[in-house]
Image (cartoon, grey):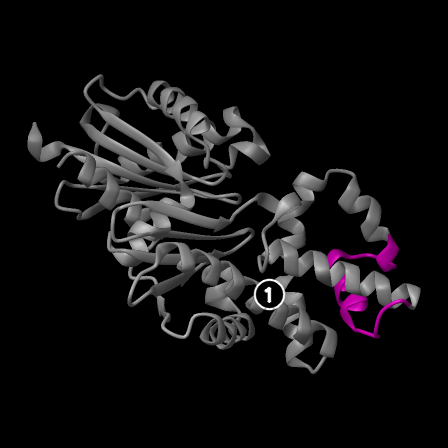
């Protein structure tokens, strides 16, 4: 029955997955959560399990079953390549037990964040959470990106980079090769270490697993900066400047007459010092750009894209 038909909007990140079940008018009927869904980090099998868990909870909350699903849009971290998207779409369709007529689309999580932030209009989104990326839509409907190359090759201005720089600064102070900072003591307290050198085997034992834990050091840096630690203040300011460079590079390719940059992610939403540094630097690099808050969540953007799949 058409009145029972729902669409699913899925936001699968490196830490958790969120699914919204909505009717064809976009009214949210249910929400569900699952584990991490970045296939590049946790593997495709674990990512699919996380998405399926979130979908199951959302459908239960909405009073629906998989047979009632008309379209699914899943924005997943690490799904930036077409071959990855195609493989995940096929696997998800089977795992979710979708009806044959249901449509499914897998895109990068930045794409749904852009859709939610600007409600389908041209412009850019700058995301800084555990990772970072700038993603945009020009006035011809073409998509562009800058950054988003992952924790080994990129993620400038991200929570991971802030945490890694905090660790490096603490170790440099310990060696005497860097300025004094309270970061070493603060990280030891946060990680229950007797001395900062004990962080080294903890990180290198499983670097991919340590990525999230390192990103979780952002509040430690923020607190130290608020108490006057110069090294912490510079780490946060540099994160903002690095994010401004990403946004400016993207805006040059978008070539919009009145560019808008929406921001989202835990770093830009929760760390005022990073956001302020971003705005200051972007004003120098792209004076015409206007920085705004996102209009809606990435999961809401996925719902919008799923509804568009059904016309």
Left or right of residue 111: residue 198: right
The answer to whether residue 8 is left or right of residue 274 is: left
Residue 79: give x, y in percent of width and height: 46, 35
Q: Residue furthest right?
A: 176
Quadrant (top left/top right/bottom left/bottom right) for the C terminus:
top left
Q: Nearer the viewer, residue 127 or 64?
A: 127
Mark 1, Cα crowd under 10 Å, few <14 / some 14-19 / many 20+, is many
Q: Identify the residue under disc 1.
A: 239
Expressed as whole percent of the image width and height from the top left, the position of residue 307 reads 19, 40
Q: Is residue 216 magenta?
A: no
Q: How many marks?
A: 1
Residue at 38% from the left image edge and 21% from the top image edge: 95
Q: Quadrant of residue 33?
A: top left
Give the quadrant of the N terminus.
top left
Query: Is 42 above or below relative to 268?
Result: above
The answer to whether 22 is drawn above or below residue 184 in the figure is above
Vertical relation: 94 (above or below) 233: above
Disc 1 on helix, strand or loop? helix
- x 36%, y 55%: residue: 254
* Quadrant in the rendering for residue 182: bottom right
Corner quadrant of residue 152: top right
Q: Is residue 62 above or below residue 102?
A: below
Residue sitting nearer the eye, 16 or 239: 239
Residue ID at (37%, 25%): 89
Point out residue 113 in the picture as x, y percentages from the top left corner: 36, 51
Left or right, residue 308 beside residue 194: left
Q: Residue, x 31% and y 61% (percent of image)?
A: 256
Q: Which residues are magenta?
A: 177-197
Q: Position of residue 115 (x, y in %)?
A: 29, 50
């Amino acid at each position: 029955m058409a009145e029972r038909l729902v669409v699913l909007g899925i936001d699968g990140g490196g830490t958790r997955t969120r699914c919204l079940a909505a009717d064809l008018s976009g009214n949210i009927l249910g929400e569900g959560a699952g584990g991490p869904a970045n296939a590049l980090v946790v593997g495709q099998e674990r990512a699919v399990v996380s998405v399926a868990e979130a979908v199951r909870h959302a459908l239960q909350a909405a009073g629906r079953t998989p047979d009632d699903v008309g379209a699914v849009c899943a924005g997943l971290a690490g799904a930036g390549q077409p071959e990855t998207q195609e493989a995940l779409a096929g696997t998800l369709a089977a795992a979710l037990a979708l009806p044959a007529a249901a449509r499914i689309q897998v895109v990068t999580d930045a794409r749904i964040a852009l859709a939610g932030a600007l409600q389908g209009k041209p412009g850019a989104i700058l995301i800084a959470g555990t990772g970072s990326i700038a993603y945009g839509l020009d006035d011809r409907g073409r998509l562009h990106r800058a950054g988003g190359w992952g924790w080994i090759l990129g993620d400038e201005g991200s929570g991971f980079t802030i945490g890694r720089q905090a660790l490096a600064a603490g170790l440099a102070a310990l060696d005497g090769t860097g300025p004094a900072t309270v970061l070493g003591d603060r990280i030891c307290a946060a990680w229950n270490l007797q001395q900062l050198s004990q962080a080294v085997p903890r990180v290198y034992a499983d670097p991919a697993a340590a990525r999230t834990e390192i990103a979780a050091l952002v509040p430690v840096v923020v607190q130290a900066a608020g108490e006057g630690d110069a090294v912490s203040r510079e780490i946060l300011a540099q994160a903002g400047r690095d994010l401004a460079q990403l946004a400016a590079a993207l805006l040059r390719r978008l070539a919009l007459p009145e560019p808008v940059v929406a921001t989202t992610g835990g770093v830009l939403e929760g760390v005022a010092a990073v956001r302020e540094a971003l705005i200051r630097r972007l004003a120098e690099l792209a004076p015409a750009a206007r920085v705004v808050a996102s209009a809606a969540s990435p999961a809401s953007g996925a719902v919008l894209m799923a509804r568009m799949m059904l016309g």
